[in-house]
Structure formats: C-alpha cells, structure tokens
Image: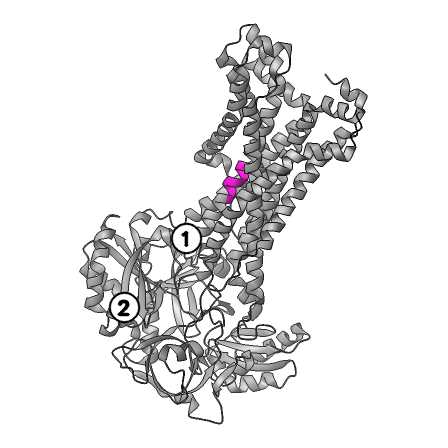
Amino acid sequence: MIKNYLKIALRHLKKNPGYSFINIAGLAVGMACCLLISLYVLHEISYDRFHQRSDRIFRVRLDLNLNDIWYREASIPFPAAEAFKNDFPEVEEAVRLYKNIEFPLLRVGDRKFAEEKFLFGDPGVLKVFDFPLLKGDAETALHDPSSVILSQDAAQRYFGDADPIGQIIQYENQFDLKVTGVAANVPQNSHFTFDFLAPLEFQMNIWESQTGQEGREKKWFWTGSWTYLLLSDARAAETVAAKLPAFVLKYFPDRIKSGLELSLQPLTDIHLHSHLDNEVDPAAAGNILYVYLFSAIAVLILLIAGINFVNLTTARFTSRAREVGMRKVVGAKRSQLIGQLIGEAVIASALAMSLALVLVEIGLPSFNQLTSRALEFRLFENWFGMAAIVGVVFTVGLSSGIYPALLLVRFNPTGIIKRSLTPGSGAERFRKILVVTQFAISTILIIGLGVIYQQLQFLREKSLGFEKEQILFVKARPEVNVKFDTFREELLRHPGIHGVAGTSNVPGEGAFGYRFIPEGGSADQPAMLPLLLVDFDFLETMDIVIQQGRGLSRTSPSDISQGFLLNEKAVEQFGWQNNPIGKKMSLFAPGTNEIAKSGNVIGVIKDYHFESLHHEVKPLVITYFTGHSYYAIKLAAGNVLENIALIENTWRQFSPDWPVEYFFLDRKLEQLYNNEQKLAQVVNYFAALAILIAGLGLFGLSTFAAERRTREIGVRKVLGATAAGLAGLLSKDFVKLVLLANLIAWPVAYYMMNTWLQDFAYRIEINWLVFVLASVLTLVIAVITVSTQAIKAALANPVESLRYE
C-alpha cells in the first residue's frame, strides 16, 4: 500500500503540473529564505561560544553619570584587574586587553606593514580564552615582554613557509619583538580578533620610557583596558556583582564614585547586547534587534509559503472526493485515508525542501555579500541541522495535509460517489482567513521597507552642521605632526587643495570625554564633556559655523594654551546663555589630577553632529592641540584621482616609511548606518519574495475558483454578461480579502516601525502615504493576478463552459 500511495501521489503531481509547480516552487522559495536567515541568526548567536569556559567568562563594563550625561564604557582602568584577583575569591583569572588607536608599523627585513589587528594582553589571556597555538607553548608564549604571537594568516604573510618561531619583527622602527607562537586564526564569530598578540607589559614599558615616570596605566583615572574575569562558577557572577559597589568605593577617585557603576557582561552577550563606547571592534558589533527582525522575517516568509501550500492543497483535495469515496466503499479505514492524504502532502513538502536546498546553495554567496558574513551551509556535517530540516518537512506536510484529510474522510461515501464534493462554508472560511493572513504579512513587509528607506533618506539628507562632500581624511603620523605646518603649506600650494586641518576625531564618530572645571565649579565635582582637539583651520575647513565670538586664530598666540570653544549645548549645560565669552575653564590632563590647560571661552559654535544621528547632540568643547590623529583635506571639485596622487607624493616626503591611509568623509558617514542599510536590503528582497509567493498562491486559488464556476460563467455569457463584468465578479471576493488584510496590517506595521525608529535620536514621522501606497500595491497585484484567470475564463466558449463536467 505504501508503494501504491507513493504512485498515486506522484500521479496527482504529474496530472496537475500547474498546481504542482505553484505549490512546490512557492514552498521551496519560502523554505530557502527561512534556511538562509536561519544560518545568519545561528551565526550571530554563536559568537564567543567556541571558548570552552564561555559561560564563566565576563567582561567588566563601566557606566558613569557626570552632569546628567551617561558615559557607558566597555573598558575600565588598568589596575582593576589585579584588584579583582586580590579582592574576589570567585575570580580565578583576570586579564586585560589593549589596542593602540594608531596602527603600529612593523618591519621584517625591507618589508613594512601597517597592522590594524595588533592587540596587547596579559599572559593569562591564553588561559581564559581558547586560542590554540599551532606552534609554541601557550604557558610561556607571552611571559617575555618582548615576545609576540602571530595568527596563522599573519605568519604566512610575513614568513611564508619558513618557521616563524624565533624570528624578529621590528616594532615602530625602535623595538624588537620575538615570535614565540603561532595561533590558529581567530574564528569569525569572536567579538575581537587579532593577527598579533603581544604582552601588555611591552606597551607599558614603552609608555614609561617615553614619559620617564610612572605611567597613567597604573592609576584609576584612565579607562583604557578591556578587562575579562574567569569566575570559578557561572553562578558566582551574582556574588561578584553584589560586591561591585563596595569595590568602586574602595578604589575609584572620590569625585566620580557617586555616579559610577561597574557591572558584569557575559562573554556570549557582548556581540549582540553591548552598545557601549570604546568597544574592541565597533564595526563588528551586532544588534539583537536585527536578529529578532530577521528571525521574524524568516518565520513570516515561511508562513506565507506554508499558507499557499495549505490553501492550494485544501482546494485540490476536495476535487478528489470520488477517489476517497471509492476507497471507503472497498474497505479503506479512516486512519489509512488520513495517512495517505497526509503522506502525499509530506512528499510534496520533501520535494519543496529538496528544491530549497538547491536554492540555498545558489543564493548563499549573494546572501553573504548582503550580510557581510562568510556563512557556510554544511548539511551533512550537522546532525542538528539535518534533524531540523526533516522536522520542517514533516511539520509543513502534516499541517497542510491534516485539515483536508479530516475534511474528506468525514463525508458519507455514497454521497461522495454521486457527485464531486463541494466544500462547506467552514473550508471556504478557513481559506479566506489564510489569504488575509498572507496579504497582511506582505503588506507589513512593504510598509516596513518604505519606512526604512524614508529614514535612510532622511539620514542622508539631514544637515549635519559641517561639510561632508569633497573632504578627504588622512590618518596622521607623529613624524608628520612635528612638521604639520610645512606639510599643510606644501599641499595648499596646489589649486586642487582648498583646505588642510588637523583633528583628534572624525566628525560623526564622537569624541573622548575629559574632565573640566568650569567657572564657578570645583575640582571635586568636575564636568565630564567630550573634547575635540584641533588646529587653527579646522572650523573653516569643515565649514562649522561660529555663533558668537571667534575661532582659534594664529594672530592670537594665547589661543594655543588658553583658548576654548564651546558648542551651544555646552553653553546651555553650564548656564552661560547670556554671556559665555570670557568665561574661565580648566582642563585636567587625562588620567591625572593635574591641570593641563586653563583659559577662557573665546567662541561658541553652532551645534553639529559630531556623533551619529542615533544620538542627540551632546555638549562639546574644542581646543588647540598639535598631536593630531587625522588630517582633514578639502579637495577642489574636479579630478579627484589627480588630487589624491598629489597628496600621496607629498606624504612620501614627510613619512617615507608609512603608507598614506585615507578615506572620504561622506562614505565614512554612510558606514555609521550599515546595519540600517543592510536591513533595508534584506527587507527589500524578502518583501518582493513575499509578494511573489502570495501572488502565486492567489493565482492558484483564482484558477481553482474559475474552474469551479465554469458553468455559471457560461450561463452568464449566454445571458449577455461581458468579459469585464465577469472579471469583476470573480475578482470581487479576493479584493475584499486583500482590503481586510490591509486594515489588519496597518496598526501592526505602525507599531513595529515606530519601535524601530526609537533607536534614532533624529527620525522621521511615519507618513500615512507609505500605508496607502503599500495597500495600492497589494491591491494592484491581487487584481492583476485574479483578473488574468477571470478574463481567461470569461473569454472561453460558452458552449464548452456549459458542457463542463
């Protein structure tokens, strides 16, 4: 009988190729989308779980409230790690990581490299984290302050097939590092990666040799290190967390104790749940919101495809009434009939899954490019994945086959044989509910896509308060900083360069917080404000507007050591709206109680967005400094490549050992909204697929409806009905369902997109026109789809229609 059931199932698929294609292809597309998004979601939630003790590893985060502004840091002071080991018996190991803002210059022989992925860490890093060494001894690899561990890729890049152990790499043309280990490449699903890992003691020795005194890394002011704790037990985190307030009171400076909080972040939460300043790799940070959104899209797409499958299967099963009646007459049991019909649905589901697996293999490279991931689909290497796929096949088959099977087997066989079964109102109502659900989901996706694109357009067009076009940012170097005036003058001699300025930060990426004593304030309660360090030409180069007073000027030498600029928010915070010019301010040196600069406010600038539009504009202080991190170069409109070549040639005169690193500001700013752009692209593709799948289903249902009403159409034509009138008659019911779907979709879509927009400090008001356009689009698609079949039926010969059946 099983062989017979299989033969009958395949015969029905072959007998109705159109329905079979719509059914299986629509379901396959939905399954493929679900599988692709599942790969992405599983990858995102797998971050840092490859460490064997990941459930016992926690990172310490710092939250500081100064002057009603919260500073949320992923890093804490350097001495905290040793204090944690001494004060907390629950802490088995405490290790620190550190990364220089400047990419170090490394040299092997005549070859030079600028390395971005260069980390410093305590020797215990290899005890806490699982970074297996392919060569070298993990116990001793970082004990020598002048040692370094290379990743497998870095070892190949530097030394080829030669043994790297014992080789010397020169650091910044001054210090030698000896290779003591080669680590396997860090997995992609790690919240930090490295190509070079050197002892933190090496960097501390450099700091002390440069200053000639005890480094600030030994004090409790500078939050410069990422600190990780390996606890004796995962449950010990609650005990440690309860002791953190006392820890703060014991070690941190008195003036910030009241507003400072420490807390523990589980290692496996960092990638998706950590939206902090000073992350190890901000560009690689994920967002749990997008995991939820992608998961919801996957479920919705599969649900739409499943609804298609159920609807068409239910519709076609009712045409098999006589077959079921005959089987019942010749003795088939109820359970056998149900098993046969469900089995056929499972076979169709399995065929759809087979096609879906092929589509996943074809679409995975494009999906990886879309999500900036390197996902792999290894079906036969993952027993859990295979089990999940089999589970989906049986779940979809069972859910689509159970209802029509129960519908058919409950009828009297005598009545079934005499006539084809006409489904009751319950079956019709069920199919209508499914169609409404399907188009409601499609409409929600279209509305979501429209709102996302409007918000992205708003972000692109919003005035940021500074010039972003034709601005090239070049990564600064110390050897260029000491001759910056000459470098600037050399560039300005050329007509293609309109401005050159030095700065500590890139507009849009924020600024570091420093402590200030405003006039009327005290050293015990300093104000913590973002500080931008610039030269005389920064405001002019970036077209930042001065509201009051003046900017930094070469004609006023005192500006170098005494001049401060404030933005409007800072003036408001200090309560100096009436007369800010001339107010006194003092700036603490970073990591110390010493005053680095005292002077007066000489100007007030118009607020500009020095952070992304996810954040409201904060108070900002600007002052003069020569240790630039970047050079902003305003280019003339015209031959960009020629101007860049000019900059490169000039750069080589001042920094022959270091390659010039540059980027355009407008492109850099676009990267701040990468997640939103990726979301828009994903929703775009999957909204189109949702409409396609829903349209296929509607096409199949309208074809079936036209077939059922063949005689009625023939009679109406004989009585004078026009083709347009008949098309309207057949389309009317489906249009009502689509309209109802839109009414349901509107409030749901509004709630979802309004929640998403809350992530932006500056956002659009949701436009009702998006909802109208989404509804019009779904209606047009539905009318075109249904009318195609309705017109085809209306144009048929009425004689043939009357002879139907």
| Above or below, comparing residue 106 to residue 287 in the picture | below
Of residues 146 and 355, the one drawn nearer to the viewer in this rendering = 355
Q: What residue is rendered at 61% in x and 82% in y?
A: 498
- Badge 1: residue crowd in 10 Å (few <14, some 14–19, many ≥20): some
Question: Which mark is on residue 119?
Answer: none
Question: Does residue 46 appear left or right of residue 317 in this picture?
Answer: left
Circle 1 residue = 272
Mark 2 residue type: Gly
Asked whether the viewer can see residue 781, the reply is: yes
Q: At numbered mark 1, what does the secondary structure look like: helix, strand or loop?
A: helix
Check the image and name the residue furthest to the top.
330
Q: Position of residue 552 (x, y in %)?
A: 47, 87
The figure's colour scheme reads one colour
Q: Quadrant of the C terminus?
A: top right
Mark found first going from the N terminus, 1 or 2: 2
Of residues 122 and 374, the one drawn nearer to the viewer in this rendering = 374
Q: At numbered mark 2, what does the secondary structure look like: helix, strand or loop?
A: loop
Q: Position of residue 292 (x, y in %)?
A: 45, 47
| Above or below, comparing residue 358 to residue 663 in the picture | above
Q: CA distance from mark 1 to mark 2?
A: 26 Å
Q: Position of residue 322 (x, y in %)?
A: 62, 13
Of residues 794 and 288, the one drawn nearer to the viewer in this rendering = 794
Instruction: Tell me, yes or no, whether the highlighted magenta stretch contains residue 581.
Output: no
Mark 1 residue type: Leu
Question: Does residue 316 appear left or right of residue 745 in this picture?
Answer: right
- Badge 2: residue crowd in 10 Å (few <14, some 14–19, many ≥20): few
Instruction: Using the rendered view, name the quadrant where residue 152 is placed.
Output: bottom left
Q: What residue is rendered at 45% in x and 44% in y?
A: 42
Q: What residue is rendered at 64% in x and 19% in y?
A: 11
Question: Which mark is on residue 259?
Answer: 2
Q: Quadrant of the N terminus?
A: top right
Q: Which residues are magenta?
A: 297-303
